Image: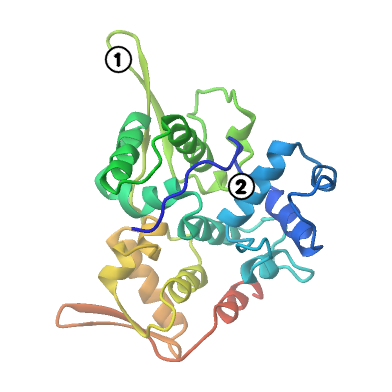
């Protein structure tokens, strides 16, 4: 397992226009550690650190605080969706957040934890995180930091339960809230105590554009020309894991991709072997253009 990282967000979820702000700041060769960063970004000191953290976590900045290819593609002068108005863009950012592993609770949640539990409480998730840390002997035993990360994950991917009044401004301002990945519920037991729990169910996710699925395959499996259905369903950072696809959902997506782009991709089922094949080399940018230039 790759190195796990916790904290760094300063307890702020990533807000709607933060990534564009980070991109513009970094594109002008400005430095987050400079005294003027507070003025240039128009936020407090802690938020400056949070913006930089989320920029790296979402794959907008590289390790040198330089804008990445996907950042230029989305937020540059000819940016395809600089104000995050398209659900496909949120799906792309979600993919990069999980894959980057800078916000490790997201990587662990989508790649591992959801395979153990589809319905859970925060206590379940925290126990899982502490178990993983202990099993792999990571030097991260700060329970407070781990709990803050778990809280941020829940606030980022779930809307407050229907009858609940939002008490935290972040509950509705996070950039991924519209993905509505997690459902929140509250239940009162016989003693009158209220327990909050969450549900994540595998689905067909028919609304995900085919091009976003293809982008993730090309990005996560560079150079591979043949990938098994099982790998694409449950592999590390696979479309199935990232987008919580059911078996039926992934089958439908791969079939649609092969039909739509039959000159580039083929999906076959032979003697029980289900395989997605790349017939012709194609760039990630080409595939994104196929979607955004429609």
User: Which of the pair 24/230 is nearer the observer?
Assistant: 24
The picture quadrant where one finds residue 59 is bottom right
Q: What is the distance, in whole Å, between disc 1 and disc 2 at their CAs?
A: 34 Å
The picture quadrant where one finds residue 206 is bottom left
Residue 38 location in percent, x, y? 80, 42
For residue 38, side relative to residue 98 (left or right): right
Residue 54 location in percent, x, y? 61, 50
Query: Which residue corresponds to the image point at 14% horizontal and 82% vertical from the top-left?
Result: 271
Question: Does the rendering let one see residue 204?
Answer: no
The picture quadrant where one finds residue 234 is bottom left
* SS for dot 2: loop
Residue labelled with disc 1 = 189
Residue 83 location in percent, x, y? 72, 55
* SS for dot 1: loop
For residue 59, side relative to residue 267 (left or right): right
Query: Which residue corresponds to the image point at 60% horizontal and 62% vertical from the top-left?
Result: 63
Residue labelled with disc 2 = 175
């Amino acid at each position: 397992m790759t190195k796990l990282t916790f904290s760094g967000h300063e307890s702020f979820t990533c807000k709607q226009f933060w990534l564009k702000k980070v991109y513009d700041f970094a594109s002008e060769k400005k430095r987050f550690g400079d005294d003027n960063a507070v003025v240039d970004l128009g936020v407090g000191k802690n938020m400056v650190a949070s913006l930089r953290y989320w920029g790296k976590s979402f794959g907008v900045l590289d390790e040198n605080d330089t804008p990445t290819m996907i950042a230029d593609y989305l937020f540059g002068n000819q940016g395809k969706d600089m104000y995050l108005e398209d659900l496909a863009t949120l799906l792309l950012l979600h993919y990069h957040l999980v894959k980057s592993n800078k916000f490790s609770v997201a990587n662990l949640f989508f790649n591992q934890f959801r395979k153990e539990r589809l319905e859970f409480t925060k206590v379940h998730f925290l126990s899982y995180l502490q178990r993983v840390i202990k099993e792999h002997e990571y030097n991260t035993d700060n329970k407070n930091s781990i709990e803050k990360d778990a809280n941020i994950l829940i606030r980022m991917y779930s809307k407050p339960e229907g009858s609940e009044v939002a008490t935290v401004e972040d509950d509705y301002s996070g950039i991924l809230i519209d993905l509505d990945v997690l459902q929140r519920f509250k239940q009162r037991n016989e003693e009158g105590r209220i327990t909050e729990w969450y549900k994540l169910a595998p689905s067909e996710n028919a609304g995900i554009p085919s091009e976003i699925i293809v982008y993730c395959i090309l990005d996560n499996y560079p150079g591979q020309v043949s990938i098994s259905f099982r790998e694409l369903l449950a592999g590390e950072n696979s479309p199935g894991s990232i987008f919580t696809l059911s078996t039926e959902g992934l089958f439908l997506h791969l079939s649609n991709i092969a039909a739509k782009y039959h000159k580039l991709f083929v999906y076959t089922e032979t003697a029980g072997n289900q395989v997605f094949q790349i017939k012709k080399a194609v760039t990630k940018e080409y595939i994104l253009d196929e979607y955004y230039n429609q």
